[in-house]
Amino acid sequence: MPHHDHDSSLRHRLGRTLRTPIGITALTACLLVALVAVLGPVLLGDRAARIDTDAINQGSSAAHLLGTDQLGRDIAARVVVATRLTLRLTLLAAVIGVGGGLLLGVAPAVVGRRLGRLITATVGVLVAFPGLLFLLFLATIFGVGSTGAVLAVGLAMVPPMARLVQNLTASVAGSDYVAAARILGVGRFKMVVRHLLPNIAEPSVLFATQATGGILVAFSGLSFLGLGVQPPQYDWGRLLNEQLNRIFVNPAAALAPGAAVVLTGLMFGLAGEVLAQAGGRRAPQAPEPARGQQPNPSEEPATDGDGVLVRACDLRVTFPGGRQAVRGISLDIARGEAVGLVGESGSGKSLSALALADLVPHPGRVTAGTLRFDGHDLRDDPRLGTELAMVFQDPMASLNPALRVGRQLAEVAEVHLGASRAQGAARAVDRLRAVRIPAPERRARQRPHEYSGGMRQRAVIAMGLMGEPKLIIADEPTTALDVAVQEQVLDLLAEVREDSGAALLLISHDLAVVAQVCDRVLVMYAGRIVEDLPVTALLGGAAHPYTRALVGAVPTMTTDPGTELATIPGRPPEPGETGGGCPFAPRCERARERCHRTAPELSDFGPDRQVACWFPVGTAAAGGSVAATSYAAEATS
């Protein structure tokens, strides 16, 4: 079940996070504090309560590590014993604050508009009220004692928690999948549990755990002021109050409860960071084959072949619910080779490239039998920024509008290459000059909005050249540019390849661009590579019906204006639509019964060519009939 898969994945991520230095530190601290809270009263309870009139107000000694109080009781034992009560009351207040904050936070997204506005306005007023005054106001209302302090501190946490949750749910509630769930009649409770809360879990958990540290400080502060725990009970705040007047005589006795508060607060912060990492994309990644999708050993060579720069075998990108957007593709890119990746929107082109660069957005998960770049395993040793460059479709989204272009380029050299600020700035100017940006010294001091579209794209290419890239991944680099600028960018990529010897993976919808730049073409459909062929065979020699249809849908300068262009009926399957047959079969005129029953694998089809089709163009169709002609052979001839 998807829920089981999600829980298992979360457990794996949590396990990996706990093996990191911050995870080990947080786990050790939590276990230590838990042991002290559980065993402290059992082992030292009698010692902490024993009154000794012969040892009143003594200093530190071998018998009393932190000295004694005004009744001769051992202060160190009392600090240890107070851990249980302090933590119990702190966690109880945190439950009140988190629970109330979640209820008020998600309420505007599920109740009526008027009530939702009233709740939002109320939370806004409470957040604007000074937190300390609000806490003291609540403590006065609920009265002196541990119960009143718990209610006061817990309710004081509700407004900031509710405001955070409201802001997070407002962004999620406007998503298309939430609107679709409402149209389908999903109930309010299920809407909150399945669509809202899981998508705001990471920042909410991080805020809640860090706020718990604040609750500990606030609760101890109330006890210190005499508004919290009352004698004969005692917590760290109460102990601090009792020993403060002796801070110059026995400073250790006064500082020990305060140190316990600070260290335990840090423990809550570390625990929140670990949980946030385990629930988000920052969790350490480990190779893990998809369930039921074991890599094919025959596709995984022991070593990279001669001249192979990138090798991926059984590469998959999976999203929650088992939806695979990239479904087991295998590809090689040789050194200096230009490879085009084409296909309809949603076919998995960009995600395949992002998987190579370790940039797949959360909550996507990348698995592969082999994922190597220049002899390195990309899962253990990402090369982005030094030997692997990425050029995105929208350069304005790749450049920070608040920073100067030269500063952004220089940062790449400073972070990845260890260059100084001056060295990074000089290299940024040099790279801008290399991509033919005029007056690079002046342009480096400008911000992205002062560049034209073509210049911004060149600046992004220059950013990729700040290192010594062996592979450039260009994701639709010319889509937003006019024809003249598009030609300049393509010429620039060709020059960069020639000068640096870098390989190029070009993702594009424009077959003409691919035919102009690339040596080889990979055609993707429904997360799979359906054809691998030389670019010289793209226009007239494609074997897969889908490739033929893509070519036929593009007019050329020689196409008769009256010619009807090829169209592909239907729509591509969604990532979750994984039938047993060929994914293109419902849209294919050559499909037979076998196509709907079994999915074909990518197999050899002539020299340097592969195709995943039971009845490719150029072979006999089912029943021994002569192969059909291409969809658009006449339209492109």
Image (cartoon, helix red, strand yellow):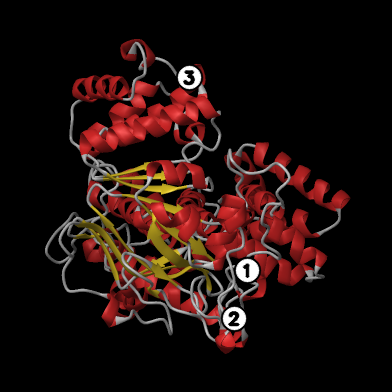
Q: In x, y percent, where is residue 351?
A: 46, 57
The disc at residue 432 is: none
Label 2 Cα neighbours within 10 Å, binned few <14 / some 14-19 / many ≥20: few
Mark 1 or mark 3, earlier in chain: 3
For marks 1 and 3, give the one nearer the viewer. 1
Which of these two is toward me, 353 or 43? 353
Examine the image and state in which quarter residue 584 appears. bottom right
Q: Secondary structure at mark 2?
A: loop
Identify which residue, 97 or 332, lies in the foreground.
Answer: 332
Q: Residue at x 76, y 59 (%)?
A: 179
Find the distance from the CA under tag 1 to the CA under tag 3.
Answer: 39 Å
Q: Amino acid at mark 1?
A: Pro
The x, y position of residue 607, in whole percent, is 31, 67
Q: Is disc 1 placed on a helix, strand or loop?
A: loop
* Residue at 53% across, 45% down: 510
Badge 3 is on which residue? 451
Rendering coords of residue 444 (x, y %)? 35, 17
Instruction: Identify which residue, 140 or 628, lies in the foreground.
Output: 628
**Are the residues flagged by discs 1 and 2 in contact, CB closer than 8 Å?**
yes
Marks 1 and 2, how far apart at CA: 9 Å
Q: Which residue is mark 1?
A: 573
Q: Residue at x 63, y 65 (%)?
A: 572
Type of residue at label 2?
Answer: Gly
Check residue 579 in the rendering and tell me which mark sits there, or answer none: 2
